[in-house]
Image (tube, rainbow, N blue to C red):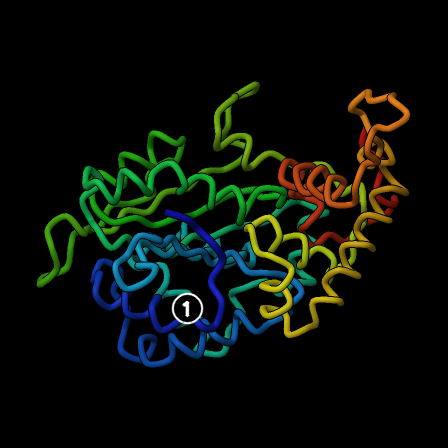
């Protein structure tokens, strides 16, 4: 079982799971335009991979089998306020209808960067669907350990101020409550849908966390440090896909560039790290023998990847308001 970010080639499978699952309902116009809406979003500013994840079972008899999909969007504060003030079921349908009606509910990358360096972001999670609805099913149990890992990969390092999410059924709602979310409203399951598919909406706000709270959700929504490296958007993208486990060849295919261009990007990343954090590119093994092998570039790269995995703010859009990025001590 693995997770990874969705790309254009995955959309038919995602839409098929969406239709088969039947938990998240949308109006006819939204369903008609959903393939275009998702494809348009993935195409926007390809330098920044989007928080749209899938989970798949690699042991499928006919290739990887899609097990779950999850989508989140950063929205304007007034949109988040509207969703709380006038709660309605099916966040995905509501947000898409706003977009189809000519409104701009979602932040673009420049707006995300400004909010990231400012007061913080309003995040909406309008979609998470599993192939198996029963949370006690063996496939669901296999998903559980990597579900939070994917969430962390998509959202850690962002300055998230508040989160509004939707799940389906009481067991999923209890799972959200255990993570610190507060219930906004539970809606009745519509006629013709399974009785355990009632939508539940939850919120969590950084300001509501008790002082000194230490739990997974409080860590995810804490204000992150500014990035110390100041990597360019193109370098951030290469590093983000590397954190997924993509090879240089796979990254090149995703971005439509040559493998040599990916290697050049890595050289630029290592140069930047060496300039700002030389200790990450220094041999700390303690080997002093004259015939000790030199530290290779691949070893430096692994060290840098692990640093980035623990400091995801280095890979997020960020527009400093005044001061330049500060060196992390």
Q: Position of residue 38 (x, y in %)?
A: 45, 71
Q: Is residue 318 left or right of residue 33?
A: right
Q: Quadrant of residue 280?
A: top right
Task: Determine crowd level at label 1: few under 14, some 14-19, many 20+ residues with C-alpha closer than 10 A.
Answer: few
Residue 25 versus residue 153 in the image, above or below:
below
Total marks in image: 1
Q: For this view, does 252 lie left or right of residue 296? A: left
Where in the figure is residue 83, as x and y percent of width and height? Answer: 41, 55
Residue 35 position in % (x across, y down): 39, 76
Residue 201 visible in image: yes
Query: What residue is rendered at 33% in x and 47% in y?
Result: 201
Q: Which residue is mark 1?
A: 10
Give 269 or 27, whichever is nearer the viewer: 269
| Residue 138 sits in quarter | top left
Up the image or down, 31 lies above or below 286; here it is: below
The spot of residue 222 in percent (x, y) is 60, 34
Quadrant for the C terminus, please. top right
Vertical comparison of 192 with 171: above or below: below
Q: Which one is in front, 300 or 182? A: 300
Point 34% across, 29% down: residue? 178
x 28%, y 69%: residue? 16
Residue at 48% in and 33% down: 217
Q: Is residue 272 left or right of residue 84?
A: right
Residue 128 seen in the figure: no
Nearer-the-camera pick, 232 or 58: 58
Q: Is residue 69 left or right of residue 238?
A: left
Q: Residue furthest front?
A: 291
């Amino acid at each position: 079982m693995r997770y990874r970010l969705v790309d254009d080639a995955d959309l038919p499978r995602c839409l098929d799971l969406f239709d088969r699952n039947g938990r998240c309902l949308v109006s006819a116009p939204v369903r008609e335009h959903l393939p275009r809406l998702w494809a348009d979003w993935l195409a926007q500013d390809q330098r920044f991979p989007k928080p749209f994840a899938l989970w798949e079972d690699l042991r499928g008899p006919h290739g990887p089998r899609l097990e779950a999909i999850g989508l989140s969007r950063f929205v304007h504060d007034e949109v988040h306020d509207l969703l709380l003030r006038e709660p309605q079921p099916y966040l995905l349908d509501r947000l898409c209808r706003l977009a189809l009606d000519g409104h701009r509910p979602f932040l673009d990358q420049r707006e995300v960067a400004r909010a990231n360096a400012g007061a913080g972001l309003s995040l909406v999670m309008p979609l998470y669907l599993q192939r198996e609805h029963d949370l006690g099913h063996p496939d669901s149990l296999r998903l559980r350990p990597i579900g939070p890992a994917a969430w962390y990969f998509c959202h850690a390092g962002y300055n998230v101020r508040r989160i509004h999410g939707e799940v389906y059924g009481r067991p999923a709602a209890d799972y959200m409550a255990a993570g610190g979310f507060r219930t906004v409203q539970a809606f009745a399951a519509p006629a013709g849908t399974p009785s355990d598919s009632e939508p539940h909406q939850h919120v969590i706000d950084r300001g509501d966390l008790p002082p000194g709270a230490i739990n997974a959700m409080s860590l995810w929504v804490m204000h992150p440090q500014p990035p110390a490296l100041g990597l360019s958007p193109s370098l951030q993208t290469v590093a983000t896909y590397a954190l997924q486990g993509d090879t240089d060849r796979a990254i090149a295919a995703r971005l439509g560039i040559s493998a040599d261009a990916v290697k050049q990007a890595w050289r630029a990343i290592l140069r930047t790290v060496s300039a700002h954090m030389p200790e990450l590119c220094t041999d700390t093994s303690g080997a002093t023998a004259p015939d000790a092998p030199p530290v290779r570039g691949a070893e430096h790269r692994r060290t840098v990847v692990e640093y980035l995995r623990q400091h995801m703010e280095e890979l997020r859009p960020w527009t400093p308001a005044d001061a330049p990025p500060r060196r992390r001590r």
